[in-house]
Amino acid sequence: MMTSRTCTTALATVLSLSTSLAFAQSGDVAMSMDDLVAAAKQEGQLTTIALPHDWCNYGEMIEGFKAKYGLEVNELNPNAGSGDEIEAIKANKGNTGPQAPDVIDVGLSFGPSAMAEGLLAPYKVSTWDEIPEDAKDADGHWYGDYYGVLAFQVNKDIIDNVPTDWADLMKPEYANAVSLAGDPRSSAQAIQSVYAAGLVATPDGGGEAVGKAGLDFFKKLNEAGNFVPVVGSTATLAQGTTPVLIHWDYNALASRDTLKGNPATEVVVPKSGVVAGVYVQAISAFAPHPNAAKLWMEYLYSDEGQLTYLKGYCHPIRFNAMSKAGKIPQELLDKLPPAEAYDAAKFPSLDDQNAAKAAITGEWDSVVGATVQ
């Protein structure tokens, strides 16, 4: 697991939250920032889940939150998938102990489904108006926090010819090489990877058609002996177990930096099937520390939190608004991949994602037949 990178630049544009600023709460109860901080400190702790320190710079994010507010952060199962997060809420509805998550960070399709099951508590952060309308629930049950595109990270000590598109992965030279960064039956990242592969064959198809095309791609990849049924990570990439790892560009770029050339890796945004994915935040309706959860959300969506995401190569959800306001340091922009790599990116609609997710999670075993673990 990577450690978070140290901040090298003072964030002069951090959001100033005054005591006069009111925050929208569940039940429309107004609370000042000072009151919220006091209530959170009384609770004393925040419980998170599925936040690896090398994912979107969450290591620095967590440390920044702890330093700013003096709260303890109990981190559950950093490598869990979105489906695991939802199950953790369900399994701990009556539990106020350390195994009950206060907040979740899940793939876009998991937000509305969890809301429909009554698992999420509404809350609107103070920067609510700068979150795009199509990336949030109108009542505040879930809201986008960052996005990226799926990319190939390649161990160049093992792979001589770096693949540049999905079709390349079928070549014999990639035998026992290609892996996903999660189980496609439960991980949003893995589900989106299968969707991206299917998008190449059905660029104009609906979610179900794209999902089925993606399943067909991985069936052929598995039959060719190129697919490795292991949850890929920086460690498995470096060890050579999974020398071609498909995951979000922000994870791949952070992984590349952490490895520091040992081994040398290259991160490639494929020429086709470029899929952008939005992740969303939400507060558990059964959160043992609801005020700490709200304070965490305020921190994530402040200028400071959004720039922390960007330092981890994740495009923060307020990126456009902050860019227009001149709040993004040029040195952070210079570290991102060339803008043209993202020109063909597709942001699947929620309906498409839901249809694709149903096809992929429901038919992976019968079509692909590879148990990823």
Image: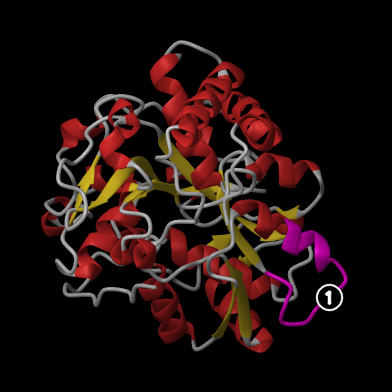
Give percent across and percent down for residue 194: 49, 34
Image side of residue 1 versus residue 364, left or right: left
Above or below residue 303? Residue 339 is above
Give percent across and percent down for residue 164: 22, 33
Quarter of the figure with residue 361: top right
Residue 28 visible to an observer of this rendering: no
- Magenta stretch, main secondary structure, is loop
- Which residue range is magenta in the image? 87-101
Give percent across and percent down for residue 223: 49, 32
Q: Is 182 covered by the magenta stretch?
A: no
Give the labeled residue for mark 1: 95
Q: Could you tell me the amino acid type at mark 1?
A: Asn
Residue at image coords 84%, 66%: 93
Above or below residue 11? Residue 150 is above
Quarter of the figure with residue 165: top left
Residue at image coords 25%, 55%: 253
Quadrant in the picture for the N terminus? bottom left
Q: Is 94 covered by the magenta stretch?
A: yes
**Number of numbered discs on residues:** 1
How is colour applied across the structure in the image? secondary structure
- The answer to which of 311 and 157 lies nearer the viewer is 157
- The answer to which of 120 and 351 lies nearer the viewer is 351
- The answer to which of 57 and 17 lies nearer the viewer is 57
Q: Secondary structure at mark 1?
A: loop
Farthest residue, direction right: 94
Quadrant in the picture for the C terminus? bottom right
Residue 319 visible to an observer of this rendering: yes
Residue at image coords 36%, 58%: 306
